[in-house]
């Protein structure tokens, strides 16, 4: 069963060809999803996992970068939506990690915030040579992403990235073992599809069992760890510095904090 491309109002489209479900984010300018978009993405990834025509999922994006996470401008206008946005993030990342099918994520350009969650939840990651991975949460007045970042990188690297907000390159991510391969940008889609074809040619029943088995032997519970982090996001939103970071981001200026004196 081959499905034609379906354009979604929430910024992504899906096709299924020869057992490969390809979900493409395309929400200019930076593939930052709003509240409704995260929930719609979770719904679609869950549907693909139970579609009898699909045997493997490829998640990639068009545009300047893979995914910049949540729509900060929406949260600046509607900070009360943070609970629903948190739920949408949680559901999307879980839909990837707990999907019955293997999920290959192909990233390019910036991989930030929620983009890290999707990537860290995946089974296999391929990257264009222009990809960078970062978690600017501290600079956006939020928390979250550390659990998924720690599934990609060593603990101290995660803390360096989290505290400083400094990104790392695809080459460094490959050196640290997070990325299966790094290819030129023009070869990214084919690199992901080549891996997907290998998986799609195998027994779907065996692959589904393998995915469930591998999830079961992971250290700790990824979703529980992320839930823990999200509690701190809600706490962060009670701080006036959190609102200042979002306002500064929207106004394209440096944030101003009233740091306590020692």
Image: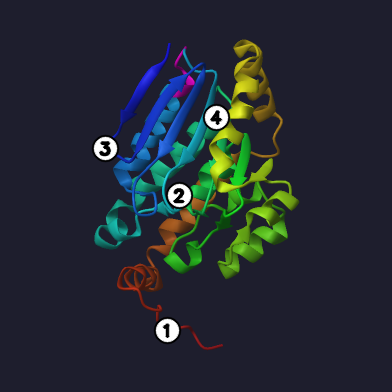
Q: CA distance from mark 1 to mark 2?
A: 31 Å
Give how far across and how far down residue 20 sits, in percent. 51, 22
- According to the image, label 1 marks what residue? 258
Q: Is residue 189 left or right of residue 45?
A: right
Label pair 1/4, CB-CB below 8 angstroms:
no
- According to the image, label 4 marks what residue? 98
- According to the image, label 2 marks what residue? 67
Q: Look at the picture and state if 152 lies above or below 161.
A: above
Alpha-carbon neighbours of circle 3 within 10 Å: few (<14), some, or many (≥20)?
A: few
* Residue depicted at x 39% and y 28%: 14
Residue 4 is at least partly visible in this image:
yes
SS class, disc 1: loop
SS class, disc 4: loop
First of labels 1, 4 by sequence position: 4
Q: Look at the picture and state if 261 lies above or below 173.
A: below
SS class, disc 3: loop
Give the foreground label among 1 and 2.
2
First of labels 4, 3 by sequence position: 3
Label pair 1/2, CB-CB below 8 angstroms:
no
- Residue reaching furthest to the front: 186
Q: CA distance from mark 4 to mark 2?
A: 20 Å
Q: CA distance from mark 4 to mark 3?
A: 25 Å
Viewport quadrant of the N terminus: top left
Looking at the rendering, the stretch of residues picked out in magenta corresponds to 48-52
């Amino acid at each position: 069963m081959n499905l034609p491309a379906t354009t979604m109002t929430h910024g992504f489209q899906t096709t299924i060809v020869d057992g490969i479900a390809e979900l493409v984010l395309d929400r200019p300018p930076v593939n930052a999803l709003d509240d409704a978009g995260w929930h719609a993405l979770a719904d679609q990834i869950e549907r693909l996992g139970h579609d009898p025509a699909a045997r493997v999922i490829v998640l990639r994006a068009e545009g300047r970068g893979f995914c910049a996470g949540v729509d900060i401008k929406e949260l600046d206008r509607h900070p009360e939506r943070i609970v629903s946005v948190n739920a949408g993030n949680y559901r999307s990342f879980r839909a990837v990690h707990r999907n019955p099918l293997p999920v290959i994520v192909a990233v390019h350009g910036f991989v930030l915030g929620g983009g890290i969650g999707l990537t860290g939840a995946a089974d296999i990651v391929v990257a264009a040579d222009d990809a960078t991975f970062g978690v600017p949460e501290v600079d956006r007045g939020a928390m979250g992403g550390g659990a998924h970042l720690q599934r990609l990188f060593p603990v101290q690297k995660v803390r360096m990235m989290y505290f400083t907000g400094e990104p790392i390159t695809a080459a460094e991510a490959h050196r640290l073992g997070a990325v299966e391969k790094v290819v030129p940008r023009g070869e990214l889609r084919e690199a992901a599809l080549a891996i997907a074809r290998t998986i799609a040619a195998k027994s779907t029943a065996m692959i589904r069992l393998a995915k469930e088995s591998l999830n079961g032997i992971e250290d700790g519970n990824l979703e529980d760890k992320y839930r823990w982090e999200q509690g701190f996001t809600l706490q962060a939103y009670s701080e006036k510095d959190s609102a200042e970071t979002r306002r500064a981001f929207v106004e394209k200026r440096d944030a101003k904090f009233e740091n306590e004196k020692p």
